[in-house]
Amino acid sequence: MIGPEFREIQIDLGALRRNVSHLKTVIGVEHLMIVVKADAYGHGMVPCARTAVDAGADWLGVADVQEALTLRQAGIQVPILAWLHSSREDFQEALTNRVTIGVSSLAQLDAVANASYAWTDGPAPIHLKLDTGLSRNGIAPEEWRKVFERAKYHEGDGAIVVEGIFSHLAGAGPQADLAAHVLFEEGIAHARDAGLNPSIIHIAATATALTSTSMRYNMVRIGIGAYGVSPDDTTPVANLGLTPVMTVRSRVAAVRKVPAGVGVSYEYDYVTPQATTLALVPLGYAEGIPRSASNSAPVNVAGQVRKISGRVAMDQFIVDMGSEWVTVGDPVVVFGDPKRGHPSASDFARACGTIGYEIVTRMGGRCVRVYVEL
């Protein structure tokens, strides 16, 4: 039987707990939402949600209703906001399970109001999402007046209550974010002019929550920062007072000594420059290691940081160890905590031409996820 360290994703819930507590203290607003969408960015939604709540989060954020229902089925009771919906979404089931709906269009607003009539616990709480420049889901500025007026009508009918208004920044630079902030303020003012009185306002995710006090309002949505990955991949996560939660581990599966001039992996786009030792690591793109890591991404093999050599395959990749001693069974860390001598998820991401978010979220496949408290 294959042991867990053959392909292992270690999740340190102790690090997650410390990260959430630190962020709550540093940011200091009334409501702290921890975003656990996409299986908690690849870390495991239910255990991470429980840990985040235990550490002080009073809201959880997810993309869709099904993710929210999974949390409710696990017995998690704090408010949950879901904001990305199918055109056939069953909002009645969501309301029955006390899921707060993020509304991005007039059609969604009417659908939630209609579902609310079968709900017996009072008006359905919703958060209106305003598009302030990201051009994704969200109510476009030219639709604000119509949606706000309809929302006020549905409030008067007892179907809904506009509990919150929110938006999301594009991260296209300080000027773009400032323009979005100004537009968001205009949207809030128009909503209040229409007679709405939202009690929760939020626009800031991790990066903005840590750097802009004016955009914290009374709730922030913390996603990647909770998992100890830097939101911009240029600031070391330790500088933010955070610790990586995920460590991807394996063990050397085979060792081969070869002379100079030997082709390595598919298509021979790496050829050994000298006599050397090759270590085989049993992780590939089936586990989430991107092919763009080929010949570029750093990994720690037997205590030495080296680059992946040659093409990443479906099940494995190779590392040229040079003159370093390595044996079958030696430990491998693809990424983890730099304080322990490991490449970070951001280090790995930069080498692949992507961002830490993608690297941690895509990890899985045949890996065994192991939860620890360090």
Image: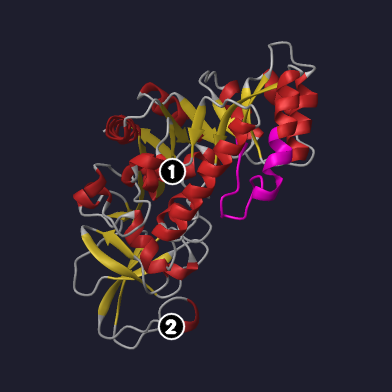
Task: Residue lying at the far front in this picture: please name it.
Answer: 193
Residue 85 lies, in percent from the top left, at 69, 40
Callout 2 touching callout 1 (CB < 8 Å): no
Residue identified by numbered label 2: 269
Which amino acid type is marked by label 1? Ala
Under circle 1, the secondary element is loop
Image location of residue 89, percent across then percent down: 75, 35
Q: Nearer the viewer, residue 159 or 45?
A: 159
* Residue 237 point in image, percent of width and height: 28, 49
Task: Out of 123 and 50, give the one closest to the viewer.
Answer: 123
Count of numbered labels shown in the rendering: 2
Quarter of the image with the C terminus is: top left
Residue beneath label 1, please? 205
User: Which-is-in-front pick, marks 2 and 1?
Assistant: 1
The answer to whether one can see residue 338 in this image is: yes
Q: What distance separates the C-alpha of mark 2 from that of mark 1?
A: 40 Å
Q: Residue furthest bottom?
A: 261
For mark 2, give the secondary structure. loop
Q: Earlier in the sequence, mark 2 or mark 1?
A: 1
Q: Is residue 20 above or below residue 365?
A: above
On screen, 345 above or below 296?
Answer: above
Q: Residue 222 lies in what quarter of the image?
A: top left
Residue at 44% across / 32% down in the picture? 219
Residue type, mark 2 in image: Asp
Task: Check if residue 132 falls in the magenta segment.
Answer: yes
Instruction: Give the class, few, some or many, for how many residues have Cα within 10 Å of label 1's Cα (few <14, many ≥20).
Output: many
Q: Nearer the viewer, residue 213 or 291?
A: 213
Q: Is residue 372 above or below residue 270?
A: above
Q: Quadrant of residue 263?
A: bottom left
Horizontal placement of 19 versus 355: left or right?
left
Question: Which residue range is magenta in the image?
Answer: 128-148
